[in-house]
Amino acid sequence: MAQKKRPKARRRERKSVPVGRAYIQSTFNNTIVTLTDPEGNVIAWGSSGTAGFKGSRKGTPYAAQMAAREAVRKAMMHGLRQVEVYVKGP
């Protein structure tokens, strides 16, 4: 029997972005950190919920710190080394 050829899966290219922006949106219930390139294309993001916190624990400063750490770890794999920080929230 003839073997069927599988189509090759495309690999996503990791673009090198040395400079970017960090947008931090903080509310009473959650914190969302988004890291972008200078044009505004999202490189990585993290939130208190994706860092493993549930319920009222998502609103704590420690949860925000863990969310930021997770997003930065992802962005550094894309070569991000320097950011401008924009903060929004109460």
Image (cartoon, helix red, strand yellow):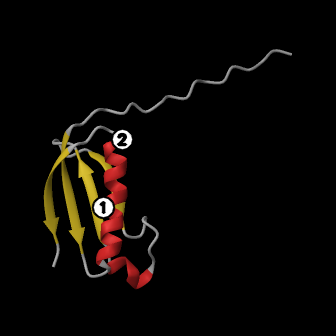
User: In the orientation shown, which residue stands out farthest toward the bottom?
Assistant: 56
Q: Residue at x 21, y 37 (%)?
A: 18
**Cβ–Cβ below 8 Å for labels 2 and 1?**
no
Residue 37 horizontal/vertical position (percent): 21, 43
Q: Quadrant of residue 16?
A: top left
Residue 59 horizontal/vertical position (percent): 32, 79
Q: Residue 68 — which label? A: 1
User: In the orientation shown, which residue stands out farthest toward the top?
Assistant: 2
Q: Residue 80 — which label? A: none
Mark closer to the chain start, 2 or 1: 1
Q: Residue at x 30, y 61 (%)?
A: 68
Residue 21 horizontal/vertical position (percent): 18, 50
Quick one: label 1, few (<14), some, or many (20+) residues within 10 Å? many
User: In the orientation shown, which residue stands out farthest toward the right?
Assistant: 1
Depth order, front residue of 26/65: 65
Please name the amino acid that badge 2 sits on.
Met
The reply, left or right, for residue 13 in relation to residue 39 is: right
Q: Quadrant of the N terminus?
A: top right
Q: Residue at x 27, y 56 (%)?
A: 34
Q: Quadrant of the C terminus?
A: bottom left
Quick one: label 2, few (<14), some, or many (20+) residues within 10 Å? some
Please name the amino acid that badge 1 sits on.
Ala
Name above or below for residue 29 compared with residue 15: below
**What is the distance, in whole Å, between disc 2 and disc 1 at their CAs?**
15 Å
Q: Residue 77 — which label? A: 2
The reply, left or right, for residue 48 in relation to residue 2 is: left
In terms of secondary structure, where does tag 1 sit?
A: helix
Residue 42 horizontal/vertical position (percent): 28, 47
**Number of numbered labels in the structure image:** 2
Depth order, front residue of 41/67: 67
In terms of secondary structure, where does tag 2 sit?
A: loop
